[in-house]
Image (spheres, rainbow, N blue to C red):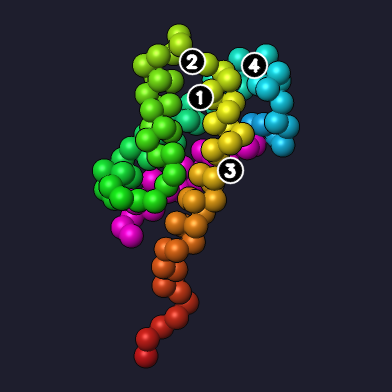
Amino acid sequence: MDIEVQKYLYDIQESVQSIENYLAGKRDFNVYTENKMLRRAIEREFEIIGEALNKLSKVIPNIQISRKQQIIGMRNRVIHGYDKIDDAIVWGTIVRHLPILKEEINTLLNSLPSPPDSNSHDC
């Protein structure tokens, strides 16, 4: 995998981790809906995830990430339809699809070859 693909995968991984950190282990829809800053932060992370997935699928069209098109579609709705964002849909994505995406991204990253050991020297 080339460096561009790795970057997109790492960007997605970082955004998933950020969403988990924002929620601080508390998966409570009422807390989510009552905190505008939390909602906006999570929406921004979904923008990043969707954009990275969009670019990734242009480089590797057949990449095996379930719900790829739905996540890209969510990114488009968050950016272009800010006034029509349904908190229940975003929350459902967090609860049902984010754990699967996290696992898939981690699997893809773990399948990458390890970088060469910088301490080894050919003699």
Q: Residue at x 49, y 15 (%)?
A: 85
User: Which of the 4 image quadrants contains residue 75?
Assistant: top left
Q: Which residues are magenta?
A: 1-21
Residue 81, quarter of the rendered image? top left
Say whether residue 105 is left or right of residue 23.
left
The percent position of residue 36, horizontal first and vertical second, equals 61, 15
Instruction: Categorize mark 2 by other alpha carbons within 10 Å: few (<14), some (14-19), many (20+).
Output: some
Element type at mark 1: helix
Mark 4 / mark 2, whichever is N-terminal: 4
Determine whether the residue tagged by mark 2 lies in a helix, strand or loop: loop
Cα–Cα span, label 4 and label 1:
12 Å
Mark 3 burial class by Cα count in 10 Å: few <14, some 14-19, many 20+: some
Identify the secondary structure beneath mark 3: helix
Residue under circle 1? 43
Residue displayed at 50% across by 31% down: 45
Kindly report the distance in space between the C-alpha atoms of the residues bearing marks 3 and 4.
Answer: 20 Å
Classified by dominant secondary structure, the portion drawn in magenta counts as helix
Q: Are marks 1 and 2 in contact (CB under 8 Å)?
A: yes
Picture layout, residue 55 above or below residue 29: below
Which of the two residues, 107 or 2, is positioned nearer the viewer here? 107
Q: Earlier in the sequence, mark 4 or mark 1?
A: 4
Mark 1 or mark 2: name the one nearer the start of the chain: 1
